[in-house]
Image (cartoon, rainbow, N blue to C red):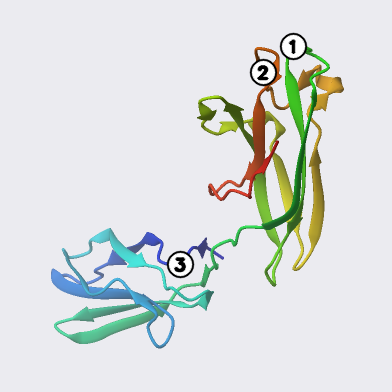
Amino acid sequence: MPQFSPREIRTAVAPMSNPTAKSFSYAAELYLGLPKAASSGAISFSLAAGETRNISFPVTMPDAPGTYPVYLDVFVAGQLLGAYQATEDVIIEAPLVPFTFSNLSASRTRCQSATAWNTLNFGCTITNPTGRSITHILTPMYRVGTKRGYSDPIARPEFARELTLSPGQSYNYYLPGNQPALDRCTILLGFSAGVPYGGCAFLRDENGNDSPQACV
């Protein structure tokens, strides 16, 4: 069944036919649920004798999550000509809630693959606070702390991880700064006159929601 988000705008297309020997003007309405939870409103169109044409019905999806039957009513001169129900219902899914984060930690250590730099080990506890399974793609992010302040966030998409948690489930996430198998570090922090720069690490999901930051 088609799945959409609340208040998402979609356009349904239905082939409409005039099987008669004369042209007619029609009005049709596509709607979801009974009573109507969403509607295209009346869409007017004309069909010549024997003509078939695709008619578009724009609909803003309902706010409330659930499963909605799809109906189409067709009128001529204000009289109901036909009432139809689609073979598939529409599912409105609740927006994905972000994970929650706790026990954040960051520790600075020397980058083994580039010893002129430091790196950060980062960890946290990730929890699904909802009553349904949730999947998010989490990308490590960091900011470098210098004498001029902190840099803009820097993403490390090559270390992104897709995580699925059951209702109420927690997961202990840990990203070591040193990645010997890749001969590289996840985060690079420099020095200024021998003094190491600070840094903050955090996670960002695919919707742009950020965890709190752990800093050194």
Residue at point 86% right, 21% down? Answer: 180
Q: Which residue is mark 1?
A: 116
Residue 35 image point, x, y percent: 40, 88
Within-10-Å neighbours for mark 2: few <14, some 14–19, many 20+:
some
Q: Is residue 35 above or below residue 29?
A: below
Q: Which residue is mark 2?
A: 190
Check disc 1 and give the amino acid type: Ala
Contact between labelled residues 1 and 3, with CB atoms less than 8 Å apart: no
Dot 2: what SS? loop
Residue 88 visible in this rendered orientation of the protein: no
Q: Within the image, what quadrant is residue 38 found in?
A: bottom left
Check disc 2 and give the amino acid type: Gly
The CA distance from mark 2 to mark 1 is 7 Å
Q: Is residue 184 above or below residue 108?
A: above
Dot 3: what SS? loop
The CA distance from mark 3 to mark 2 is 46 Å
Mark 3 or mark 1, whichever is nearer to me: 1
Question: In the shown orientation, is residue 137 left or right of residue 60?
Answer: right
The CA distance from mark 3 to mark 1 is 51 Å
Residue 63 image point, x, y percent: 44, 73
Q: Which residue is mark 3?
A: 6
